[in-house]
Image: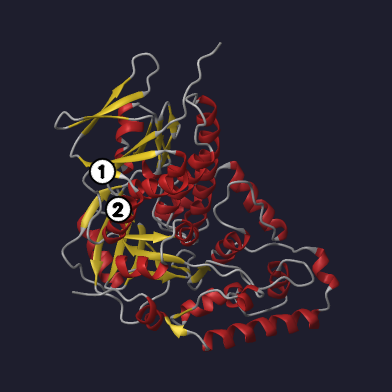
Amino acid sequence: MTEAVSAPRKVVVVGGDAAAWLSANMILAALAPAGVTVEVVELPGQLRPADVYAALPPLEALHRLLGFDENEVLRSAKGTFSLGQSFANFSGTRPPFFHPYGSVGRDIGGLSFAQFWVKARQAGLKAEFEDFSLNAAAAKQGRFFTPTASLSAFGRFDYGYHLGAIAYVQFLKAKGLKRGATVCPARHVDARLDPHNGHIRSLVLGDGTEIGGDLFIDATGNESLLLGRALDTPFESWATWFPNDRALTFAGEPLKALPVYAQVRALAAGVLHLAPVQDATSVTHVYHSDHIKDEVALENAVAISGLRPRGGATVSPLNPGIRSAAWVGNCIGVGEAACVFNPIDNPGLHVVHLGLVHLLNLFPVDGRLDLDATEYNRITRTSYERLRNFQLCHSQLNRNFGLPYWDYLRETPVPDELAVKYALFKARGAVALYDEETFQADDWLSVFIGHGLLPDSYDPLVDQTPDDEAIGQFQAMLRYIREEVDDMSSHAAYLELHASAEFS
């Protein structure tokens, strides 16, 4: 008779930033009733005062699931809302475009609004695709709203956040400790492996303390101390598509009219990203060191943003890519320990969220981990690669001809799956959505169209709707958006009423 193998009961999380404390909160919220405990081996954080977590809309749902009060989160992290991102200078002489976190337009006769817009555009329509987005219209006027039942009848309206990173981690830590997580501060950690199966048996801290567990979560960021260093899991670089190897960051003064979106601007040899929080503006410049030196990168970031560093700037190495497996033995890497992304499109916290959701769905029911690990690695790799493909659109669809940096990015072949997406959209304006996609059809449409990729044709069923009826629908949508935005409060006023940080 085979001896029963017990399910994991103790989870050890290693790290010091949001990935570690989100892990503790999510695991305890889901599994503490089943007797699972969490100990956090807390390493020194890698965050700098200027760092901001720019979060995608799914974080709002995660906060609700964890019982976090939204206003408390924003007050604690001096956070702001984000209705999307503005992209400038990616497409030659084309004007900036807005990627809204929500739907664009409303279906007409059961067919996608985008199909009608393509037909109208070919007939001379001047209105941009984003003009039919409530998120985009509100963001451009500095207004904010929370979705209501009446708005939901018009479409899907989501929002993300910009959160002061260090303060957000402190908030998560306080919540995790309240849930029952224990914490052991450490400055150094080594893994002791089982010689029979290669699993992590325990962690040895700098003072000789030894901590055992059943599962070990590597939340150590791009250092990947357990998954990468201890278990020697290979790292697959994405430098072919994302050649930037440096990230310069500093905090500037808050912008006078508090934006409700992030700003992304293409430079001659890199990208500049501005993310506002209540008391500052985080400026990040990613670039390749072969094209530009750190001193020049700082000069450019200051000149173009119009913001001067408060407390100096920091430069960090950047190496986008993925570990060949995120779950090896009894170790699971989350966030950058498993996959490192370019900062554009704000994937950082979302990658942590994805990894933990799939871990909870596949949390071992006994001590036999191989099947769970195999499926986890399949599904997380798929998720991360499809998120990567969305990011690739910004660089590969650029129209900055004659600039070597951008010419290289545009001419580099994309993965086959993304090439199929391009071809289908170019042919008929349709978006191929696959399993494990982070972004929805309207997100892809906004980015494709915003970067200047327009379809050659449209769904012929659109022609069954008389042109005057479609025009009337267009006018009604624009009128509805205008009236709704006029009634909204400003972003700053909304925060002042609901979630203003208390400054000392």
Tell me how many marks there are.
2
Numbered label attached to residue 173: 2
In the picture, measured across the screen, residue 53 lies left or right of residue 148, that is left
Residue lying furthest top in this view? 1
Please indicate, yes or no, whether residue 332 appears anywhere in the rendered image: yes
Q: Earlier in the sequence, mark 2 or mark 1?
A: 2
In the picture, measured across the screen, residue 405 lies left or right of residue 121, that is left
Q: Residues within 10 Å of mark 2 (few under 14, many from 20)?
A: many
Q: Are marks 2 and 1 in contact (CB under 8 Å)?
A: yes
Q: Residue at x 35, y 81 (%)?
A: 496
Q: Position of residue 165 (x, y in %)?
A: 30, 59
What amino acid does circle 1 point to?
A: Val
What SS does tag 2 mark? helix
Q: Cα distance, mark 2 to mark 1?
A: 10 Å
In the picture of the structure, the residue carrying the numbered disc 1 is 183
- Quadrant location, the N terminus: top right
What SS does tag 1 mark? strand
Q: Residue at x 41, y 67 (%)?
A: 70
Within the image, what quadrant is residue 328 found in?
Answer: top left
